[in-house]
Image (cartoon, grey):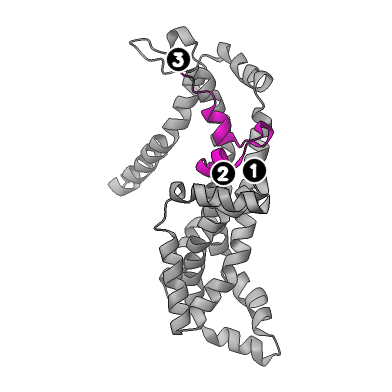
Amino acid sequence: MRWLKPEATLRPLLILALLGVAAFPIYWMLVTSLTSPQHLFDASPRLLPDFGQAAVYLEIFRDHPVGLWLRNSAIVALGTMVLSIALSVFPAYALSRFKTASMAVLGLMLFVTQMLPEAMLVVPLYTLYSELSLINTLLGLILANTAFTVPVVTWILKGAIDAIPEEIEEAARMDGCSRFGTVLSVVTPIIAPTLAATAVIAFFNGWNEYIFAQTLIVDSSLHTASVGLARFIGELSTPMHSVMSVALIYTLPAVVFYLFAQRYVVAGMTAGSVKG
């Protein structure tokens, strides 16, 4: 009988261990959400969920507009994702193909935008939004999140476009394709994995954002899930089982979205590392 190589045994065990570490926070949220309040702070923590407490999920949907919060978060996240990619493709192409001083300055300016934290811009942004009637609108949140996401997405796409041989574009232009058409019909399909990776980054930025969502939205019907989750924190007490229930519901759509796109993320993040 042939003995298995140590590498063949250790690799699956290591993968399972890493998966366990990654999935444990989600499992612990499930356990905590299904633990009765009187047992939450026992000296011996419960390691298995008590499904007899599953009614807490019905209660939070009955007593709080969780579905509405999730809908608003989805609108903001998807809007940020689509707008960020749409506004980043052509600047990324320009940075990659036009090696001029003005392009270098543009690239530096994109870097500089990442040096400013969101908290510093809340007051001037609120003033600007008041003049533009964007306060208390989901469109305002999408625009604010996009402004912070576009520089990151642009530089990631630039790295992918750098790896595309310019001869491919020259062949397309010889066939009568304009530069605009070349970007859309030739470059964009080639960098599709990187577009998927940046889509995930932009989606998570819009899904998880809290400062702008808390400051720029007044109407409770437009609150995102991140703001709605914070509303459970009380001055004297916090219902931890309810908080963990909403947190689990809030986390799962993002996890499912990432699992669906993760193979494209890996391919996209490494696309610009090797010249083609």
How far is the residue under mark 1 from the one under mark 2? 7 Å
Q: Position of residue 102 (x, y in %)?
A: 47, 81
User: Magenta stretch?
Assistant: 206-235
Say what secondary structure mark 2 lies in. Answer: helix
Residue 219 painted magenta = yes
Q: Residue furthest right?
A: 176
Q: Position of residue 72 (x, y in %)?
A: 66, 40
User: Circle 3 is placed at which residue position?
Assistant: 236
Q: Are marks 1 and 2 in contact (CB under 8 Å)?
A: yes
Within-10-Å neighbours for mark 1: few <14, some 14–19, many 20+: some
Residue 45 painted magenta = no
Say what secondary structure mark 1 lies in. Answer: helix
**Amino acid, disc 2:** Trp
Q: Residue furthest top?
A: 38
User: Circle 1 is placed at which residue position?
Assistant: 74
Q: Earlier in the sequence, mark 1 or mark 2?
A: 1
Of residues 209 and 137, the one nearer the viewer is: 137
Q: Quick check: can you spot residue 86?
A: yes
| Residue in the picture at 54% in, 26% down | 231
How far is the residue under mark 3 from the one under mark 2? 29 Å
134 lies left or right of 40: right
63 lies left or right of 252: right
Q: Quadrant of residue 89?
A: bottom right
Q: Earlier in the sequence, mark 3 or mark 2?
A: 2
Within-10-Å neighbours for mark 3: few <14, some 14–19, many 20+: few
Q: Main secondary structure of the magenta part?
A: helix
Of residues 32 and 65, the one nearer the viewer is: 65
**Amino acid, disc 1:** Ala
